[in-house]
Image (spheres, helix red, strand yellow):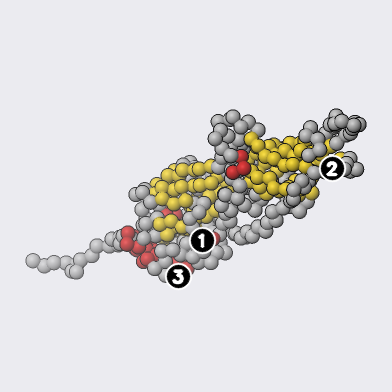
Amino acid sequence: MQEIQNNKKHTKLKWLSIVFTIAVVAAIVITSSVIGFQKHGISDLEQGQADAIISPEIDAPITDGEGNELENGEIHKMPRAMTFRSASALANNASYDSITLTATVKPVTADNKTVDWSVSFVDASSAWATGKTVTDYITVTPQSDGSTTATVQCLKDFGAQIKVTVTSRENAGAKAECTVDFAKRLTGITGKISGGATFDALTDGSFNYGNPDDTLVIDYTYTYSAYTVDDTLELVPEVQINETVLADLNTSLTKKIKIREAGYTKTETSAKQTCNLLSLFCEPLTSNPSKYVALSPATKNEVLTWLKTHTDAGLFSIRYEATGSYSSVDRAVRIDFDASLFKTYVEDVTLDDTAIII
């Protein structure tokens, strides 16, 4: 409660306090897929749907200065600070981009309860804020002129702290402020494949790998939002195999292949991923079916023959998963192929005649 003194002419001492309560106004329904991952692959997926198995970056409610989430539909006491993790301009992150603040003027018997709302940079001379208009990032809109209720909306991510101020029209000294921060978010994962092709793992549903038996290197570049609150997202891409599609592939093979025990392993770093997709499989040894070895040329040819007509079946995908303090990412991108780049491997060498008489 703030105590202020009104020294206007013919007035006596009056105490006024402004108490804030807030209610989240952006209701959200998060629809997520229930995804089953077995030890070495992705299960219970429909063929060709590998690009749809992972939800986009998780949208997140506003938090107070203690890190508590301000739940939808509830009324909260105004914190001294709040942090946005969503913004209208960020893809898949607009569901929690606004919050409603209600100022209660006390005493309840005060004749004039009208207030004015404003928003400003805490330090307008800071390097990031210089030359920028604060309302391009945070806006505050009262329900009506002088209303004690207003909606604060985050339009874009920002890199300098902002404050929302509400002031009594009767007494300019009666005011309260709430600082507003924005938490760092991952906004882009750009993969560059050997040979020059690129894709964005956060927006693209698939990318073309070329020949699955080629060893390729994918170099990653990560981009982030502007922010006033830092966050750490440790993300290591991981190749995964759709076991439903693998079962379909096996119906056309002479020898049924399986995923190697080493399986799809995570990359050595978050910046570089080396892949040879067919090397993730093994086949039973003819002389000892309980023992599995690398794919033979004959089996490779059968796999590639099947893939020529199933280039976008979703046999492989790359999963990107990371959880930070303020946000998280869980997404998969389907790997497609270019049948024109496939090779046919030599399986054997024979002679027409096994003996020659001279």
Q: Left or right of 44: which side holds 307?
A: left
- Which residue is rendered at x = 72% and y = 48% of the image? 142
Which quarter of the image is occupied by the C terminus? bottom left
Badge 1 amino acid: Ala
Residue under label 3, please give it.
251
Which quarter of the image is occupied by the N terminus? top right
Q: Earlier in the sequence, mark 2 or mark 1?
A: 1
- Give residue 120's position: percent from left, percent from top: 65, 37
Badge 2 amino acid: Asn
Q: Say if 256 sits above or below 222 in the image.
A: below
Q: Secondary structure at mark 1?
A: helix
Checking the image for residue 112, the label placed there is: 2
Counting the numbered discs, the total is: 3
- Give residue 248's position: percent from left, percent from top: 47, 68
- Callout 2 crowding tier (Cα within 10 Å): few <14, some 14–19, many ≥20: few
Q: Left or right of 53: which side holds 248?
A: left
- Give residue 91's position: percent from left, percent from top: 56, 52
Q: Left or right of 226: which side holds 346?
A: left
